[in-house]
Amino acid sequence: MRRLVIGAVTGLVLVAAPLGAQVQLRLGTESRATYSDIHEQLQLGTPEADSVRRMLAETRPRRLWQVARRMLEGKVAWDTGVLALTRLAELRWPASHDSVLSWRKQIVQGDIPPPPATDLMDLFPSLRAVDLELQRGAHGDQWMLNDILARIPDAHYDQGDAWVLGRLGAGAADSLAARFLATTDRDLRVRYLTLMSYSTDTTLIPLLQRIHAAPDSFNLPLRAGARASDGLAWIGTRASMQALLDARAAARARGTYADPKLGHADLDFLGSDSSSVVSRTGKWAAEWVAVLR
C-alpha cells in the first residue's frame, strides 16, 4: 500500500490486484457499470451488495467512525471498515478532522495494535481522503486541483489524493490529459495515466482507448495498458466499454501484447485484462455494452 503523501502512485500502473485502502466502488447506477476494487464480481440483489448499499447510504458520521474503530479491533472486516472511511470522506463531517489527526498519531506511535495480517499504515490514504474532502469543501475544486497538480511531479501524493482528484470538476480530466501528452518524462507520464484512471470523466475515453491499444506509441511500458483499461472500466458507460473492446481488438491485431512474458498464469495479457474487468464489474465488457444505454 502506498504511504501518506510521500508514496508515489506510479507503481500502481503495474499492479493488477486491488489495494488495501481507499475504495473505488459504484453500485446501482443505471448508466454506468457496477465497479468494486474490494469485491469479486459484486452483483445487485446479493447480501453482499445489500450490505454495501446500506454503508453507502449511511449519513451518520459517528456510526461510520464506530464501524471503522471496530475494524481496528478486528471485530469488523477490513474492507467494511475502509468502506466506512470512504463514506466518511464523502460526508465531509467537520469533526472528522480531529479523528483523522488522532488516528494518524496513534498509528505512527504504535498505540493501536493492528488486527492479524494487517498494516495500519495502509489506512493512511483513506484518512488522507477524509481530510482532503474537508479541504475541498472549504476551498473548492479549483483550489484542490491546483494543490494536487503541483505535487505530482515530485510524487508528493498517495492513493487518497488520487481518489479525490478523480472526483473533481474544474477541468481536472483535461488538465491531467494535457500534462500527460505534454511531458517527455516517461515516469511522469505513467503517473498522469494512473491518475486519469481514477476519473469518470467521459472526455478521457478516446485517449484511454488509444493508450490501451498501443501504450508504446506514448512511450509507456506495455503493462501500462492495464491502467488505461482500468480507467475505461471505471468510467463504466456503454461508450467506454465499447472503447475498451475496440482497443483490445486493435491491440490484438497490432500484436501489442504478443510477448508471452506479459501474460499471467495461463492467460495472455488481454485475456488477463478481460478477467480483471469481470472481477471488478461483475460482467464481461461486451455484456455491459449490451445492457447499458
Image (spheres, rainbow, N blue to C red):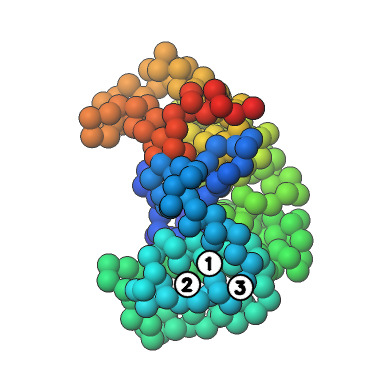
**Which amino acid type corresponds to the residue marked 3 in the rendered image?**
Pro
Q: Which residue is mark 1?
A: 85
Q: Nearer the viewer, residue 228 or 275?
A: 275
Q: x, y (%) of residue 275?
A: 36, 33
**Picture quarter with the N terminus:** bottom left
Q: Which residue is mark 3?
A: 61
Residue at coordinates 52% horizontally, 29% vertically from top-left? Answer: 288
Q: Residue furthest left?
A: 266
Q: x, y (%) of residue 270?
A: 37, 27
Q: Residues within 10 Å of mark 3 (few under 14, many from 20)?
A: many
CB contact under 8 Å: marks 2 and 1: yes
**Which amino acid type corresponds to the residue marked 1 in the rendered image?**
Leu
77 versus 215 height, above or below:
below
Q: Would residue 96 appear left or right of 268 to someone viewing this image?
A: right
Q: Earlier in the sequence, mark 2 or mark 1?
A: 2
Q: Which residue is mark 2?
A: 68
Q: Would residue 201 appear left or right of 65 to someone viewing this image?
A: right
- Mark 2–mark 1 Cα distance, whole angstroms, equals 7 Å
Q: x, y (%) of residue 145?
A: 69, 55
Residue 255 appears in which quarter of the rendering? top left
Residue at coordinates 54% horizontally, 59% vertically from top-left? Answer: 54
